Amino acid sequence: MKARELVDFIKLEHTVFDLPFIYAGAIIASAGSYHFLKYIIILITATSARGAGMSINRILGLRYDKINPRKKDWSLVKGTMKLRTAYLFTAILIAVFEISTYLLNDVVLYLSPVVILFFIADPLLKRVTSWRHLFMGFTIGLGVLGGFLAITPVFPPLIIYITVLISTFWIAGFDIIYTIPDMDYDRKNNLKTLNVRFGLRNGMVISYIFHIFTILLFVFIAFLVRNIYYDFLLIPIIGLILYEHVIVNPSNIKTIRMSFFNANSFIGIIFLIGMIISFYR
């Protein structure tokens, strides 16, 4: 199996959504000091965790993916990756994740099984509740807490909890947009999303409300860090969040992809820059 196919299987490019927030947690914990070795281990930890989570998602969702026309070219669906290979790859990723948490400290090691349980619960919840978008956002948002604890295994300050909430509402908001093309399929197969439950128009309203919460939380952090450079960086962050709602056209899948990936790819990076400037001044 080609490395490119493995990378596509776990959607490695999607780490752009959570990795900056994980490092933001680490930067906040560092409080102006440097932990270069730990930063490297955090990268390995975050990447393996993200990969394991996506792999688990693909395995548990295979029975549905096989009958979803949009996913017919996915490697596990079309058979270019065998199920046993997916299980082995997942086991390797989990092993790398566990070893890297061991290299960080006991706290993140002891908490690491909870992360795996969240990864398992996430795809299953789509069969149970329409509000699974928030659970997925929270699951990824826990990486902020993990980044902080990897550096300083103590009770986190308020800014960490606020950042977890930012990640939760931000990701939940754009996941609602991301699931638009699957609405008919989800409805027929009794898979639950907010778009299916409340209709597309109301689903988009809920997505917008989630992102308004996100913006307010980003602004709240400005009062915690009290750094004018972070204040300036709020402008592109807020602009990009609003932009993804302006450009999206539910009937045009190209705009959905642009809204999901293009607009959101930079938000976490800009926020991370803001945290670096605020805590390394």
Image (cartoon, rainbow, N blue to C red):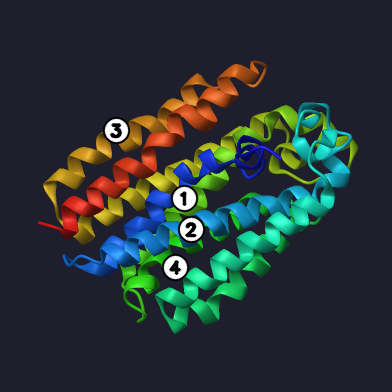
Q: CA distance from mark 1 to mark 2?
A: 9 Å
Labels 4 & 2 near each other (Cβ < 8 A): yes
Please name the residue that numbered disc 4 is placed on: 146
Identity, as a three-letter code, of the amino acid under mark 3 = Pro
Pair 1/2: label in front? 2
Which residue is label 2 attached to?
46
Mark 1 or mark 3: name the one nearer the start of the chain. Answer: 1
Asked whether residue 229 is in view, the answer is yes
- State the separation of the CA atoms marked 2 and 3: 26 Å
Q: Is residue 248 left or right of residue 212?
A: right
Which of the labelled discs sits on residue 236, or is there none?
3
- At x 30%, y 41%, the residue is 270
Which residue is under mark 1?
Answer: 18
Screen quadrant of the C terminus: bottom left
Secondary structure at badge 2 equals helix
The span from disc 3 to disc 4 (Cα, nearest Å) is 26 Å
Residue 243: percent from the left, percent from the top?
Answer: 42, 26
| Location of residue 171 in the rendering, given as x and y in whole percent from the top left corner | 53, 46
Q: Amino acid at mark 2?
A: Ala
Q: Quadrant location of residue 182?
A: top right
What is the CA distance from the residue labelled 4 to the residue labelled 2?
Answer: 9 Å
Q: Is residue 272 left or right of residue 130?
A: left
